[in-house]
Amino acid sequence: MSSDVRHTLGRWGEAQAALFLERHNYRIVARGFSCRFGEIDIIARTDAELVFCEVKTRRPGALVAPEEAVSRAKQRRLIKTAGWYLNRYPWEGDLRFDVIAIVADTNPASSPKIEWFQDAFPGEL
């Protein structure tokens, strides 16, 4: 699969994840937030908590499940990026790192399969 197709699939998955979070009463604070440490796909919040979300999107039959594609190195980059974000935009409530795993259906008219892994890994900020 070409990088353009992967990029398009990834952006589509991030849009699906943002809609999913909004349906669960989260407000999207940022999408594609980046700094020198890395990128966070979605930053969302409620009144009480701020959530840093990594979105992984795959096609059916992929060798690795989307949620399994968040390596320890990626987790460390997400934590560093979140720390930078919090230095710039202080937050007093609870924090959490989530993974939203999406499997796109081959039929464009069908809804994707979305799994939400809340508090997916410990973040030490």
Image (cartoon, grey):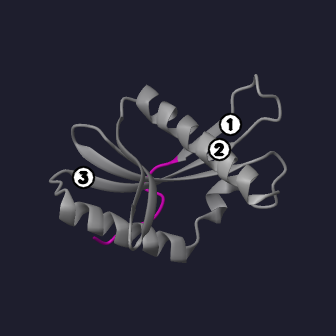
Task: Report, in whole angstroms, how far the alpha carbon at label 2 lies from the one at label 3.
Answer: 25 Å
Q: Which residue is mark 1?
A: 113
Q: Quadrant of the N terminus?
A: bottom right
Q: Which residue is mark 2?
A: 102
Task: Report, in whole angstroms, how far the alpha carbon at label 2 lies from the one at label 1.
Answer: 6 Å
User: Which residue type does callout 1 highlight?
Assistant: Lys
**Whether label 2 touches label 3, CB < 8 Å:** no
Q: Decide whether residue 123 is among the magenta residues.
A: yes
Mark 2 or mark 1, earlier in chain: 2
The residue depicted at 67 percent of the width and 55 percent of the height is 66
- Find the magenta span and give its range: 117-125
Mark 2 or mark 3, earlier in chain: 3
Q: Which residue is mark 3?
A: 94
- Which dot marks residue 59? none
Single out the mark in the foreground, 2 or 3.
2
Say which quarter of the image contains residue 90.
bottom left
Where does residue 34 sit, x and y in percent of width and height?
Answer: 40, 61
User: Which residue type does callout 3 highlight?
Assistant: Asp
Badge 3: few (under 14), some or many (20 or more) residues near its Cα, within 10 Å? few
- Secondary structure, mark 1, is strand
The residue depicted at 42 percent of the width and 30 percent of the height is 22
User: Which residue type does callout 2 highlight?
Assistant: Ile
The residue depicted at 73 percent of the width and 39 percent of the height is 104
**Whether label 2 touches label 1, CB < 8 Å:** yes
Asked if residue 5 lies left or right of residue 83, the reply is right
- Secondary structure, mark 2, is strand
Mark 3 or mark 1, earlier in chain: 3
